[in-house]
Image: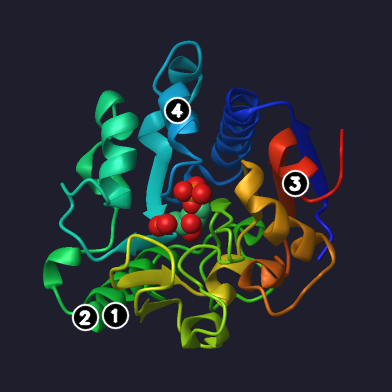
Amino acid sequence: MRPDELTVVIDPPQLALAATRLFVAAAAEAIGRHGRFDIALSGGSTPRQLYQLLATAPWSRVVHWSRCHFFWVDERLVPPDHEESNFRLAQETFLSKLPIAPGQIHRPRVEAGDPEAVATGYEREMREFFLPSPLAPQRSPGDVGSDSHLPRLDLVLLGLGADGHTASLFPGAAASQEAERWVVSTPPGSLPPRVWRVTMTLPAINAARAVAILVSGPEKGRALKSLLEGDESLPASRVRPSDGKLLWMVDRAALEAAGLGL
Ligand code: 6PG
């Protein structure tokens, strides 16, 4: 799948800056259009600098934080204060430092323990948020994608695993083939941390208004090359928004390792 936009940057700090600009612009646009910014965050190491920048001036001052709603693309089944928790990463690096109320944070309730119960509970919370009851006032038409039965996130931030996974959609795993549900549980993949996870599915991700895949570091070169070649066996290759934009943000080390110099 070719991206609608490919941003190539020199190094991880520049990747964080480019992603911060994207976040800020997408938030302003979404809040102007429907009064809210609904974003899904990823974990892993790549977005850490982006999250840190968002909590730092001038960026921390230019986002209307009280209008933002935070979701997680995927979560590891560890307690929310565990060092491997994707929620903890976002909470520590930026959410706790900004004027954001608990009602704006929509995280998978890992406390439920059983992976399937966590996934089902999270999908229920998302459905209540994105598919308001028929009695609720109508949303503006601009807020509905080509399939009004799916969540319409304004922005989904994804990473790329060295094995071609994205979110917690691992190559060959059933979760990567899911066609109906918005959130599923999935057993540990081959990469650390080897714990059960819950993950948004491709239909949920692909219903977003915009999806950005952040790719950093030489270890991502092989996966990036396969992605550029459209290798459909990689879950990341099947990230293809049906009525939205696909943006790739890639740093030089990843691009060079994919055999494409700057
Ligand atoms: C997770 C992530 C996952 C991540 C990729 C890339 O929970 O692990 O959400 O999909 O984005 O594995 O991870 P790095 O940024 O650490 O390379």
Relative side of 245 to 170, left or right: right
Please report contact status of discs 3 and 1: CB closer than 8 Å, yes or no: no
Mark 3 and mark 4 lie on one chain; the one further toward the N terminus is 4
Q: Quadrant of residue 187?
A: bottom left
Q: Nearer the viewer, mark 2 or mark 4?
A: 2
Q: Position of residue 224 (x, y in %)?
A: 73, 56
**Whole-percent x and y of residue 208?**
60, 61
Query: On the rendered image, what quadrant is the C terminus found in?
Result: top right
Q: Residue at x 57, y 35 (%)?
A: 23
Q: Contact, CB < 8 Å: mark 2 with mark 1?
A: yes
Q: CA distance from mark 3 to mark 1?
A: 39 Å
Mark 1 touches mark 4? (CB < 8 Å):
no
Q: Is residue 132 visible?
A: no
Q: What is the secondary structure assignment of the residue under circle 1?
A: helix
Instruction: State the residue in front, 215 or 127.
Output: 215
- The residue that appears at 75% across and 63% down in the rendered structure is 227
**Mark number for residue 120?**
1
Q: Quadrant of the N terminus?
A: bottom right
The answer to whether mark 2 and mark 3 are in CB contact below 8 A is no
Rendered image: mark on residue 117 = 2
**Classed neighbour count for the residue bearing mark 2: other residues with Cα under 10 Å, few (<14), some (14–19), many (≥20):** some
Neighbour tally class for label 4: few under 14, some 14-19, many 20 plus, Cα within 10 Å = some
Which residue bears the numbered disc 4?
64
Badge 2 amino acid: Ala
Look at label 1 and name its amino acid.
Answer: Thr
Separation of disc 2 and disc 4 at Cα?
A: 33 Å
The amino acid on which the numbered mark 4 sits, given as a three-letter code, is His
Helix, strand, or loop for circle 2? helix
